Amino acid sequence: MAREFECMNANMPRQKILIVDDMPTNIKVLGDALKNDFTVLFATGGDKALSIAFSPHPPDLILLDIMMPDMDGYEVCRRLKSDKQTWDIPVIFITSKNEEEHETLGLEIGAVDYIKKPFSLPIARARVKTHLELKRHRDFLEWMLMKRTSEMREMEAEYARLFFRENNQN
């Protein structure tokens, strides 16, 4: 069983992380820390981040700064969480806003975590891995539910056909 799981994981595509920050040095630091384990995308503003998130191949997780010039991270998160196409992409705020009310707001609008700058790279990496693992499990459970629902509908349709045929023969 463990061997099957290892094979299944080996065949899975690398998960994608979108880093959104208006400071290229912040993107570089995080990107360098994550690039060995994940495919790393980046955006320096909210509009570009939304464009990537709404693309045919969206990221699996978004690391999002709050303070950006064109559109703040809160607004980016609100737009992601209000759309059926992107509502399930986990968002982790990484920001220098250290006040409790900012963290509370971030979590209330849909972020799964909040990392305060300056941060520890090992801890940030661990949180990213945890949330990506949770997302992978959730995606698998949703896939299983859709598959089982489809199978149940097929079985119900077959039962109805058999029942109808049996009633017509009597």
Image (cartoon, helix red, strand yellow):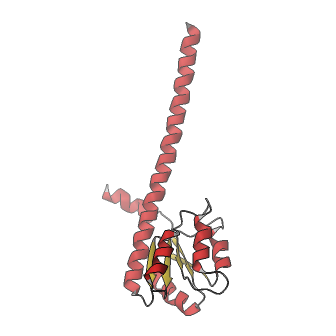
Q: Vertically, is 169 above or below 63? A: above
Residue at horizontal 50%, vertical 74%? Answer: 105
Q: Quick one: which residue is furthest to the left in this view?
A: 2
Quarter of the view holding residue 72: bottom right
Q: Quick one: which residue is furthest to the top in this view?
A: 170
Q: Quadrant of the N terminus?
A: bottom left
- In this view, the residue in front, 22 or 135, is 22
Residue at horizontal 61%, vertical 86%? Answer: 68
Q: Vertically, is 90 above or below 24? A: above
Q: Position of residue 165 (x, y in %)?
A: 57, 16
Q: Position of residue 127 (x, y in %)?
A: 40, 75
Residue 38 can be seen, yes or no? no
Residue at horizontal 49%, vertical 82%? Answer: 94
Q: Quick one: which residue is furthest to the bottom in this view?
A: 25
- In this view, the residue in front, 132 or 2, is 132
Quarter of the view holding residue 74: bottom right
Q: Position of residue 144 (x, y in %)?
A: 47, 49
Quarter of the view holding residue 98: bottom left
Circle count: 0
Relative side of 138 to 45, left or right: left
Q: Position of residue 35 (x, y in %)?
A: 49, 81
Residue at horizontal 55%, vertical 6%? Answer: 170
- In this view, the residue in front, 38 or 61, is 61
Residue 142 can be seen, yes or no? yes
